[in-house]
Each structure stands twice: as structure tokens, then as C-alpha cells.
Image (cartoon, grey):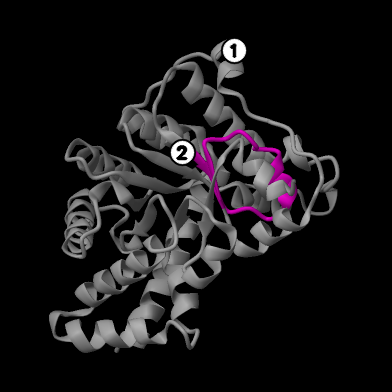
Amino acid sequence: MNQLDALKQLTTVVADTGDFNQIAAFSPRDATTNPSLILKAVQKPEYAHLLKEAVAKYGAQGLDEVMNRLLVSFGCEILKHIPGRVSTEVDARLSFDTEATVTRARRIIDLYQGEGVHIDRVLIKIASTWEGIQAAARLERDGIHTNLTLLFSFAQAVACGQAKVQLISPFVGRIYDWYKKNAGASWDEAAMAGANDPGVKSVRAIYNFYKKHGIATEVMGASFRNVGQITALAGCDLLTISPDLLAQLAASEAPLAKALDAGAAKAMDIPFVTYDEAGFRFAMNEDAMATEKLAEGIRAFVVDTIKLEGMMR
């Protein structure tokens, strides 16, 4: 059995791509997209028509509507290739505006439902800012499920659990990037690999906290840099993996052991924590990595959204 098949027995595998032709090759249950992945996809000849069609049909209604329609058309195509859910991202420029995030999310869901897609097959992706988490709490109460992304800290995960969001996406690779860059010449790649990887340790702490305290929010490790980070999180609820790394897993016959275990987490001594807004903001302020990577991630998604809008114009 290859590592990808072994992983699927322990964890729900999700394809991290906007390229729906690649998705079919790996038979994931779910798929995730973001503005960067959609931008990459529409520059390929086989997907360019989706952008042209959205502009031709909806251009008169403004760029926001064209963007919504483009995201939903990609999502609908992806859903033809998977049995589960697709994640579709709200404009990152709304990351600090609860009302606007709720409004945009509802519009995206309305468009999916107009295409005959059941509400449970879509997760609305929102950045894990305080405002984004509050928007997600409101959407969840209305039956619209959310995927809280750009998540780098334990505080963000705790607040998402309090908000009863459906799923969180802690960014393993970007946490690793920050610590590696910060360490500079003193970084020891071998010593910081696998279970010692700072991104892996972050996800493990979140997973164990949720399972210990019966928090139903799903944990989906994301943004992987290497196969070792993935195998060190075998047993996590879900893992969203790029096609390149899915191919590496499929090509390997190395044994794969369960690394995370909900039953074991229940027996751990992990104190319960909650955050109000002031406590959340202070915890984020104390975490330089999370603060910097959240801001950087939002900026990067905004840049790619603006590039997409440029192509629409």
C-alpha cells in the first residue's frame, strides 16, 4: 500500500488546488481553493474560459459579482470530481469587517444554491482575525459552514472553537517558514523535522486541546512544505495537500504510523482556555509569528485578488 492510501485510512485527505483536472487523479474527499490557487488556474489555457464567461455574463454587475461567479464556477467544477466539500474564500480585504464578510458569504452560498449545490457541500473560507471569527459564528448559527484559514496560533484555534466553526486550517508550512527564517544559520533541519517541526507541534497542540475538551470543530492541517510534515500529522481530522505532495505520497511505499489520536488526547492533562476580544488580541500580540504570518497571508491573498480583478478588467 502506498503512503497516500495508508494516510486515507487515518485521515480525510483534501486536495489543495484550483486545478480540478488534477483532483481526479488522487481521489480526495474534499478540496480547498484560495485566490492564489484560482489566479494560477485561470492562467492555464484549459481554465481561461471560466474567467471569460464570468466577465461576459456578469461584467455589467461589477467586479465583486464577477469574482463571486468565478469562484462559484470553479467550486461547482471541483464538486463534480469529489464526494465531499469545497472551500471557497471570501475576499481577504474584508478580513476586518464582520458585516461585509457575512454579506459576501451569504451571496456565495446563494449562488451555489442557485446552481443546485447543497449548502453542506460548501465551506466558506474566512481569515482567522477576531472579526472573521465573529462572522463565522453568525454564519454557523444560520447553517452556513465555515473554514477558518490563515490560522497560526493556539489563541486563534481556541476562539474558533468557541465560535463553533465547522473547520480550521492551521498553516503548518508557514509556521515552519517563520521559525526557520528567524533561526537563520542556527537552524538544524534534521533536529526540527517530523514531530519536532514547529508547524507540526502547533497543530498537535490544537488537535489535542479540541479532543480533550470535546470541541467539535474539525482540524485540517494545511500549507505543507514536505511529506515529513504530513506523515507527522497522520490521524489529524483532515489534511489539505498540494498535488505535488499528493504525488510524492502516492509514489512512496514507506510505512505510515498514526501520529495523532483522539482517545489519547482525552487522557491528557490540558487546561481549558477561553478568550474574549481583549484576551485574544493580547495573545496575538504576544505571538510575533502568528501576528506576522496572519498579516502577511492576508496581504498576499489581497495581491492575488487584485491581479484577478486586473484580468477581469
Residue displayed at 83% across by 48% down = 189
Q: Is residue 105 above or below residue 300?
A: above
Residue 27, magenta (yes or no): no
Q: Residue furthest front?
A: 1
Q: Secondary structure at mark 1?
A: loop
Residue displayed at 70% across by 50% down = 182
- The CA distance from mark 2 to mark 1 is 25 Å
Q: Position of residue 224 (x, y in %)?
A: 63, 53
Residue beneath disc 1: 268
Whether the residues at callouts 2 and 1 have beta carbons within 8 Å, the answer is no
The amino acid beneath tag 2 is Met
Q: Position of residue 262 (x, y in %)?
A: 55, 22
Q: Secondary structure at mark 2?
A: helix
Question: N-terminal of the two: label 2 or label 1?
Answer: 1
Which-is-in-front pick, marks 2 and 1? 1
Q: Is residue 203 above or below residue 269?
A: below
Q: Position of residue 200 (x, y in %)?
A: 65, 39
Residue displayed at 23% across by 54% down = 101
Residue beneath disc 2: 284
How crowded is the residue under tag 2: few (<14 C-alpha within 10 Å), some, or many (20+)?
A: many
Residue 132 in view (yes/no): yes
Q: Bounds of the magenta span?
A: 219-240
Residue 233, magenta (yes or no): yes
Image quadrant in which you'd find residue 313: bottom left
Q: Position of residue 52 (x, y in %)?
A: 31, 88
Q: Nearer the viewer, residue 169 or 72?
A: 72
The amino acid beneath tag 1 is Met
Residue 19 in view (yes/no): no
How crowded is the residue under tag 1: few (<14 C-alpha within 10 Å), some, or many (20+)?
A: few
- In this picture, residue 67 sits left or right of residue 45: left
